[in-house]
Image (cartoon, rainbow, N blue to C red):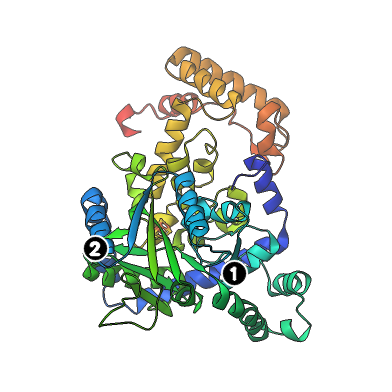
Amino acid sequence: MTSPLPFHRRVEQALGNQQLRGAIGRATARKVEGRLAALAGLADADRLRDEGRRIRANALGRLDEQLTRFVEQVERHGGTAVWAPDADHAVRYLVDLARARGVKSIVKSKSMVTEEIELNRAIEAAGLRVVETDLGEYVIQLDHDHPSHIVAPIIHKTRQDIAATFKREVGATDADVADIPSMTAFARRKLRQDFLTAGMGVSGVNFGIAETGTLCICTNEGNGRLTTTVPRIHVAFMGIERILPTLADLGIMLQLLARSSTGQKLTAYTNLLTGPRRPGLDAESDGPDELHVVLVDNGRSHVLGSELAEILYCIRCGACLNACPVYRQIGGHAYGSVYPGPVGAVFTPAIGGLADWSDLPHASSLCGACREVCPVRIDIPRMLLALRARAATEGHGPWWARVGLRAYRFTAVRPTLFRLAGRLTARATSLVARDGRISKLPGPLAGWTRYREFPAMAPRTFQEQWKGRRQESGSGISSAGL
Ligand code: SF4
């Protein structure tokens, strides 16, 4: 998802939307509390998080080996696994398959990787019908909107917003939207027919287990189970980093995912799918005739081995979004990326490059809250700084920032010039300051004073003050005392 508006304009819009900020603030506060309560119920949450990090590091450290094993197991159980180097390959595989099997209608459960590759757009462009069946994603689709949170796609909407959408887009009556249970029942009635008539179900994958070829799909609505078992073809899209070596590893990760994500001990529906329905002697009555797993790279293998590789440990719990003071003010849309918040500020430029995304690493106060809450202890602030440095080196960002930094560097390594510049700036700011504050700065610096005042520089530089103090006290404090 890219927006025609520049990043700072999107942020301004979000900050000016009180309803949005209220909805995001309330929802994230609930999630933060839920996570804390859920982790408090664990005997040794810190040890579990260490173990989760070790598992992810191990899986990503041997990704080629784990993926080979996973593909062998998927095929051994009757599925088909295909490699998609980029979004084009991934969506083309699905569209070609649907056409080859005569599929006209597709149901889909929530999946971030399919948002990333813009699967729905490709399906509709091919003249096929696709229906989102996760309640939040269903509302997003009806509204022609985009998700604003990786776990809770309509975190930015109120109940009244959703009632209006149901009435406007699918003919809901007042009784249908009287309260939340009525609205849920209404959506269920609408979607049930789509499940029964769809020729194909599309899902994401939370974890792919290398030792068994099992797909683990976690949802809190029954839609995931219906999507993957009722239509005769199931196509699962999986980012290549979502691999886990063993089922024992899955046991650890599930405990971390549910608690960090929604404050639950376990998601309501934790589906483990190994291959399509088996015919023959051990005939199974449920499940699809065909299972296809599309392994989506789309820039991930370039991230492996780089200083950003750690972001691939992410299990998409969303805890860093809920904890982030920036996300909590601006919500997900302002980031302009499918992946918002701290994780998106690293993952999006990591896979998509900095040319289009150089603003995102700056959408952080570097307070470290994301690192504190991450169940696998990903050091997001370190990578944000690395991306900022890379953006500066590669010449991304506004010209005035580049020129300003070059001028600063030139001055900072010349002590006499630095002292002179410090004195002149202090004098100049004292001329325009009122009560020690400046309310209007010139040129690109005006962006700061548009919303807040800027403190005037002290009339005397730090070096002048230090020298003065030493002279007054006559002390022999050495510069090491600094
Ligand atoms: S970076 Fe960590 S906290 Fe953020 S979504 Fe990923 S796993 Fe969760």
Q: Which residue position holds label 1?
A: 136
337 or 115: nearer the viewer: 115
In the picture, the disc for residue 73 is 2
Looking at the image, residue 2 lies above or below residue 339: above
Q: Residue at 59% across / 59% down in the picture?
A: 147
Quadrant observed for ligand 1 in the rendered image: bottom left
280 or 420: nearer the viewer: 280
Q: Position of residue 254 (x, y in %)?
A: 33, 71
Dot 2 falls on a residue whose secondary structure is helix
Please state which amino acid type lies under the numbered disc 2. Answer: Gln
Q: Position of residue 335 (x, y in %)?
A: 58, 48
Please state which amino acid type lies under the numbered disc 1. Answer: Gly
Q: Residue at 48% across / 69% down in the picture?
A: 32
> Label 2, label 1: how many angstroms apart (C-alpha)?
33 Å
Q: Quadrant of residue 458?
A: top right
Please tell me how crowded label 1 is: few (under 14), some (14-19), or many (20+) other residues with Cα within 10 Å.
some
Q: Residue at 59% across / 74% down in the picture?
A: 194
Q: Please report whichever mark, 2 or 1, sits nearer to the chain's N-terminal start.
A: 2
Specify whether 88 is left or right of 47. right
Q: Quadrant of residue 385?
A: top left
